[in-house]
Image: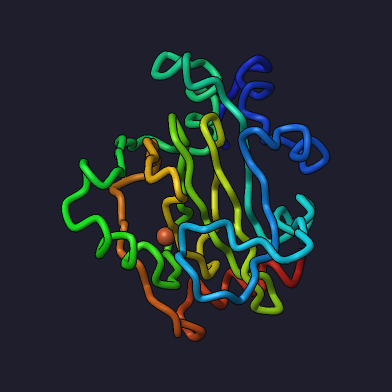
Amino acid sequence: MVDLTPEEAALAAELPPSEWAAASDHLEAWYMDDSEADQRAPHRRTPNEPCPAEVLHALGCRVWVLDPSKYPADPQLAAIRKARGYNYDDCITCTPEALPNYDEKLKNFFEEHLHTDEEIRYVLDGSGYFDVRDLQDRWIRIWTRRGALLVVPEGIYHRFTLDEGNYIKALRLFSGVPVWTPINRPADEHPSRTKYLSAVVAA
Ligand SMILES: [Fe+2]
């Protein structure tokens, strides 16, 4: 257990699902349509089918909303990092100009995969979509915008794409030496997958 002061503990507290809806300027989630159109399009169903925060929370996703104007000397970010042991960070900017072979990279980000650790992203500017699978194998699209810090759990099938704004500046956080390697689906027998499923089903 990490020793946190009461102030740090308060700052590190995740956004409870009951408050996600009020943070829709930073984060919004919906069930995706089945269209093969551009991955950067919103892919909302008609009519839109929002995904309740409680569903994402039960799938293991965690959310904070921070003020990027306070970055990097943000006590809230420091408290979250301390509480969760995120001792590594780097900042990536994805735009067609900043990223060589942009279209190919976009396709790679969009391959369905899992990781052997959490994936932690803090959107300092711009926006992007994290898609996660629910237990019925439906895609849930999570639109993260400036200020959102999202954790997707180890073992969840997911993918990422820029949206039509073609711009995200994100802080990548990690505990220990970062492992970015995606394990592409199918990975149903992978220990991270089986661990994830037993944790989610037990919850
Ligand atoms: Fe990933």
**Residue 66, horizontal then vertical, whole percent:** 57, 25
Task: Residue 44: name its quadrant.
Answer: bottom right
Assign the C terminus to one quadrant of the image: bottom right
Give the side of residue 195 with respect to residue 115, left or right: right
Viewer-closest of 112 and 181: 112
Residue 82: image location, x then y, percent: 49, 29
Q: Residue at x 79, y 54 (%)?
A: 52
| Residue 44 to residue 166: above or below | below
Give the image quarter of residue 149.
Answer: top right
156 or 159: nearer the eye?
A: 159
Q: Is residue 126 above or below residue 115?
A: above
- 137 lies left or right of 164: right
Say left or right for 44 vs 148: right
Position of the N terminus, as image quadrant, is top right
Compared with 93, 51 (above or below) is below
Side (left or right) of 167 relative to 1: left
Vertical relation: 127 (above or below) 160 = above
Tell me residue 186's x, y (percent).
45, 85
Nearer to us in this view, 171 or 80:
171
- Residue 146 is situated, as x and y percent measured from the top left of the image, at 51, 31
Q: Quadrant of ligand 1?
A: bottom left
At x 68%, y 17%, the residue is 6
Residue that protrudes farthest toward the left in the picture: 100
Q: Residue at 39% across / 40% down in the picture?
A: 168
Q: Which quarter of the figure has residue 5?
A: top right
| Colouring style | rainbow
Query: What residue is shown at x 52% (from left), y 58% (from top)?
Result: 41
